Amino acid sequence: MPPTSMVLPDGRSAAYSREVTGADLPTVSFIGRIEVDGEVLVSESTLRFRERFEIERDHARHGFHVTDVRDAPDRPGKDFVFLAQRA
């Protein structure tokens, strides 16, 4: 993706870009780059996207009871928000 320009809270300008380096679902790897004042910071990440049943199972394994599952307000239909309490 082309760099995205932004203004940081302290007023400095920054440019951020992200490049997907691998997608072998359920994992996606990418490199993020942010440039601030001529300094480039690089971050390599791999995300694992779990199914809803996996998350609910893991909550139960760790002593939680899922009371509700909702859509993320900024990404309806794409992300889940789990409400849980100690069992």
Image: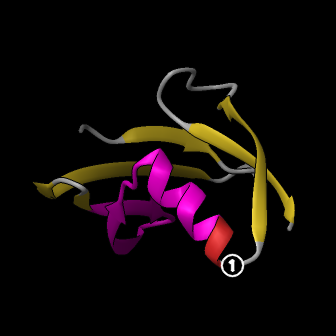
- Residue 31 lies left or right of residue 39; in this view the side is left
- Of 7 and 65, nearer the camera is 65
Task: State the residue lying farthest toward the bottom.
Answer: 62
Q: Residue at x 59, y 56 (%)?
A: 56
Residue 72 against residue 33 in the figure, above or below: above
The boundaries of the magenta stretch are: 30-59
Whether residue 37 is in magenta: the answer is yes
| Residue appearing at x 42%, y 67% in the figure | 38
Amino acid residing under circle 1: His
Whether 41 is among the magenta residues is: yes
In terms of depth relative to the viewer, which is nearer, 24 or 5?
Answer: 24
Is 54 situated left or right of 25 in this image?
right
User: What x and y, as percent, mark residue 77?
Assistant: 50, 22
Relative height, residue 82 to residue 37 (above, below): above
Where does residue 62 sit, x and y in percent of width and height?
Answer: 69, 78
Would residue 38 appear left or right of 86 to someone viewing this image? Answer: left
Direction top: furthest residue: 76
Q: x and y percent of residue 22 in the render?
A: 11, 59
Q: Nearer the viewer, residue 23 or 45?
A: 23
Badge 1: how crowded within 10 Å, few (<14), some, or many (20+)?
Answer: few
Q: Which quarter of the rendered picture does the N terminus lie within? A: top left
- Residue that numbered label 1 is attached to: 62
